[in-house]
Image (cartoon, helix red, strand yellow):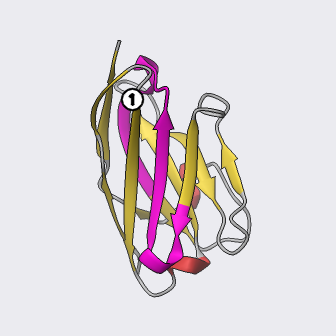
Amino acid sequence: QVQLIESGGGLVQAGGSLRLSCAAAGPTFSRYVMAWFRRAPGKEREFVAAIKRSDDSVRYADSVKGRFTISRDNAKNTMYLQMSSPKPEDTAVYYCAAADMMVIVTTPRAYPYWGQGTQVTVSS
């Protein structure tokens, strides 16, 4: 069983920066694909970014490509999302998720493990 805890959310000005963290508990963290999703008010949960286990290959949603960077530290069992130049439309609750799979999937239901979410609010 993997347990995920997000932190680092808060209020940030557009054009600033913010780093989210996702701490994972579980001995098989390094085997998993880790991902960030977000849900804005009145919208469906959407894929943001994901990072694959051993080779650290990554995938981003088009809406954040070039602005957000996903990374992980297996030694610390932690994943990060560096948000650079955030926009008001990035305002959402951000969730980290994990799944034991060989390829990155962007569908939320493919991920059985979820954190509780952290609120990110970007002011204009």
Q: Quadrant of the C terminus?
A: top left
Q: Residue at x 62, y 59 (%)?
A: 51
* Residue found at the very far top of the displayed protein: 124
Q: Nearer the viewer, residue 84 or 108?
A: 84
Q: Is residue 76 above or below residue 86?
A: below
Q: Is residue 119 left or right of residue 78?
A: left
Does 8 lie within the magenta span? Answer: no
Q: Residue at x 47, y 33 (%)?
A: 44
Q: Whole-percent x and y of residue 70?
A: 56, 51
Q: Which residues are magenta?
A: 72-96
The residue beneath circle 1 is 40
Q: Residue at x 53, y 64 (%)?
A: 72
Q: Label 1: few (<14), some or many (≥20) within 10 Å?
A: some
Q: Nearer the viewer, residue 79 or 37?
A: 79
Q: Whole-percent x and y of residue 92?
A: 37, 32
Q: Whole-percent x and y of residue 5?
A: 31, 63
* Residue found at the very far left of the displayed protein: 10
Task: Name which residue type carries label 1.
Answer: Ala
Residue 11 found in image quarter: top left
Q: Residue at x 56, y 68 (%)?
A: 99
Q: Whole-percent x and y of residue 120?
A: 32, 35
Q: Is residue 95 above or below residue 2?
A: above
Residue 68 found in image quarter: top right
Q: Is residue 88 above or below residue 5?
A: above
Q: In the structure shown, which secondary structural element does the residue marked by tag 1 occupy?
A: loop
